């Protein structure tokens, strides 16, 4: 016994190097497995999804408040209201370095989108096998005690044969798109069916749509751009601008023919502002469109949105007047400061002597004054001369054509001061927008599957009892149990009506 004990004591010592190696290998494998599992569990975490979505939402608020890809002056003016004129440039530079001025294309925002895509993908892969197993689980006949314990259960008794009842129940189920399977026993049988088993996958369809939305956003951020372009009337450009004056080639020319603002009656509130844009490609005009808010122009994947407008400082344009003598249709004249025009059929001439972009009248003193530096209420002053003598002088307002009516019935209408305004365009290219539109359709289908469709299971036991047939129908539903209950009522009602009709023949 002593020798045996000694040999047992010696054996582990002789085998220790090999056993130690194996133990270290197992430990290393466990360590690797643990690290992989930890990473996988982290990426599949619901908490990660919540924190990532919250980060995207919060930063998107900043991106909504701060104008993206616009002229620095616009954001500095906005920041001055929050932090004061002195601190605004410093805050702007900080925000610029953080990427808030071009947030949706910044590396950190795109990284958040990529992280959310990975999280959704891992979550779906992690949970899909269990869901798929439930979807593919075959429906089986149900035991009597289980059938009677179902939360939704209907019973009835009819005077007929087992075969007739079976046929009518089967037909009734088919009319509601339940494909019936049969299980037979002694003096009884069971019909069972299901529909909507794949509605459990609606959640994953929504996941796919979200992934497509995020992928579309990433593609747009990586390969697209959002810029701006202030285009004066009559001017053209083959580039747009991003951030600090960075130029983006358009590969064609966009020209602004004219810009116009319409105001509400008796108000200085803009009702509608429009621009007529022309696309010139290869030296020829290929497209022309009047754009306004929510009605942009798109060419070669680049979209021009009506965004803003303004008046060029120290600019001199052309006054567009419609001059009509008494009873005549009138003629369009394009004039500059100091130019003279004639009123047809009279000896009266008019000379443009002044202009105001926003002419107002002081209610107390009655004096005229200019109350804004943009063309809110533009007016032109004209000095009239008849037979070489100055007669009268007055202001003609664009928004109030009656101010151009003359005593002799002549009419002078101020149509425009062309060439002094610019249209502010937001210019963008988003190659991922097609994916986002597709994702929206898929999401609608997924949400419909998830909230309005359910996996319904139906069992109907038919048994002979003392010259009659007893029917017990029951079922279960993943959601909307009221709909399943209505289905059971319809199955039994239709079958009962058909059985009654056959018994009378």
Image (cartoon, helix red, strand yellow):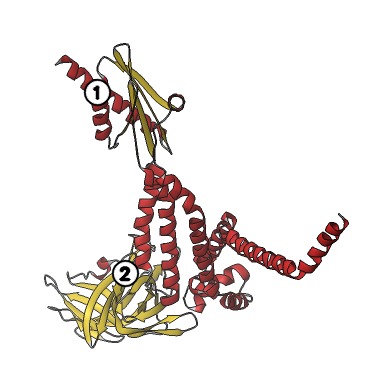
Q: Residue at the spot x=30%, y=87% of the render?
A: 338
Q: Residue at position x 23%, y 88% from top?
A: 283
Assess disc 2: are there few (<14), some (14-19) or many (≥20) residues with their C-alpha within 10 Å of its C-alpha. some
Q: Position of residue 427 (x, y in %)?
A: 38, 75
Q: Report the side of 15 relative to 165 (left or right).
A: right
Image-based side of 472 in relation to 80, left or right: left
Find residue 44 and report its image quarter: bottom right
Q: Residue at x 27, y 37 (%)?
A: 177
* Camera-nearest residue between 154 and 395: 154
Q: Is residue 301 left or right of residue 209?
A: left
Q: Is residue 160 above or below residue 192?
A: above
- Name the residue carrying label 2: 296
Depth check, front residue: 385 or 418: 418
Quadrant in which residue 84 is drawn? bottom right
| Count of marks, rendered view | 2
Indicate the quadrant containing the N terminus: top left, top right, bottom left or bottom right: bottom right
Secondary structure at numbered mark 1: helix
The residue carrying mark 1 is: 163
| 1 or 2: mark nearer the eye | 1
Q: Nearer the viewer, residue 451 or 155?
A: 155
Tell me where residue 505 appears, x and y as whole percent. 14, 16
The extreme bottom residue here reads 283
- Asked if 83 appears above or below 208 in the picture, the reply is below
> Which is nearer the N-term, disc 1 or disc 2?
1
Residue 461 place in picture, x, y as percent: 35, 25
- Dot 1 surroundings within 10 Å: few (below 14), some, or many (20 or more)? few
């Amino acid at each position: 016994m002593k020798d045996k004990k000694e040999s047992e004591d010696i054996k582990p010592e002789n085998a220790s190097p090999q056993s130690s190696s194996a133990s270290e290998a197992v430990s290393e494998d466990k360590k690797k497995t643990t690290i992989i599992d930890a990473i996988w569990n982290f990426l599949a975490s619901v908490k990660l999804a919540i924190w990532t979505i919250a980060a995207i939402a919060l930063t998107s608020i900043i991106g909504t408040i701060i104008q993206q890809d616009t002229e620095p002056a616009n954001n500095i003016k906005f920041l001055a209201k929050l932090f004061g004129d002195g601190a605004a440039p410093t805050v702007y530079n900080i925000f610029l370095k953080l990427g808030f001025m071009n947030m949706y294309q910044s590396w950190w925002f795109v990284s958040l989108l990529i992280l959310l895509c990975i999280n959704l993908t891992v979550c779906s892969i992690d949970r899909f096998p269990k869901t798929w197993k439930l979807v593919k689980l075959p429906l089986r006949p149900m035991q009597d005690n289980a059938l009677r314990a179902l939360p939704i259960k209907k019973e009835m008794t009819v005077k007929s044969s087992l075969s007739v009842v079976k046929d009518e129940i089967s037909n009734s189920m088919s009319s509601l798109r339940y494909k019936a399977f049969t299980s037979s026993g002694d003096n009884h049988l069971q019909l069972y069916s299901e529909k909507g088993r794949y509605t459990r996958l609606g959640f994953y369809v929504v996941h796919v749509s979200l992934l497509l939305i995020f992928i579309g956003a990433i593609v747009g951020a990586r390969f697209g751009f959002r810029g701006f372009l202030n285009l004066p009337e009559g001017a053209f450009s083959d580039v747009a601008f991003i951030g600090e004056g960075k130029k983006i080639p358009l590969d064609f020319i966009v020209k602004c023919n004219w810009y116009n603002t319409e105001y509400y009656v008796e108000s200085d509130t803009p009702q509608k502002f429009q621009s007529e844009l022309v696309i010139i490609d290869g030296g020829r005009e290929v497209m022309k469109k009047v754009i306004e808010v929510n009605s942009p122009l798109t060419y070669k994947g680049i979209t021009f949105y009506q965004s803003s407008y303004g008046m060029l400082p120290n600019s001199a344009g052309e006054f567009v007047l419609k001059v009509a003598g008494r009873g005549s249709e009138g003629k369009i004249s394009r004039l500059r400061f100091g130019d003279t025009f004639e009123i047809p059929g009279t000896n009266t001439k008019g000379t443009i002597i002044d202009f105001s972009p926003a002419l107002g009248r002081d209610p107390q003193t009655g004096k005229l004054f200019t109350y804004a530096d943009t063309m809110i209420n533009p007016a032109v002053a004209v000095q009239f001369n008849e037979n070489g003598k100055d007669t009268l002088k007055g202001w003609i307002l664009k928004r109030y054509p009656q101010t151009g009516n003359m005593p002799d019935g002549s009419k002078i209408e101020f149509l425009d001061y062309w060439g002094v305004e610019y249209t502010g365009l937001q210019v963008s290219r988003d190659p991922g927008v097609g994916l986002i539109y597709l994702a929206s359709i898929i999401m609608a289908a997924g949400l419909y599957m998830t909230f309005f469709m359910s996996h319904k299971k139906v069992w109907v036991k038919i048994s002979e009892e003392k010259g009659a047939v007893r029917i017990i129908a029951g079922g279960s539903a993943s959601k909307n149990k009221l709909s399943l209950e209505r289905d059971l009522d319809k199955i039994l009602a239709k079958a009962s009506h058909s059985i009654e009709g056959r018994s009378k023949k």
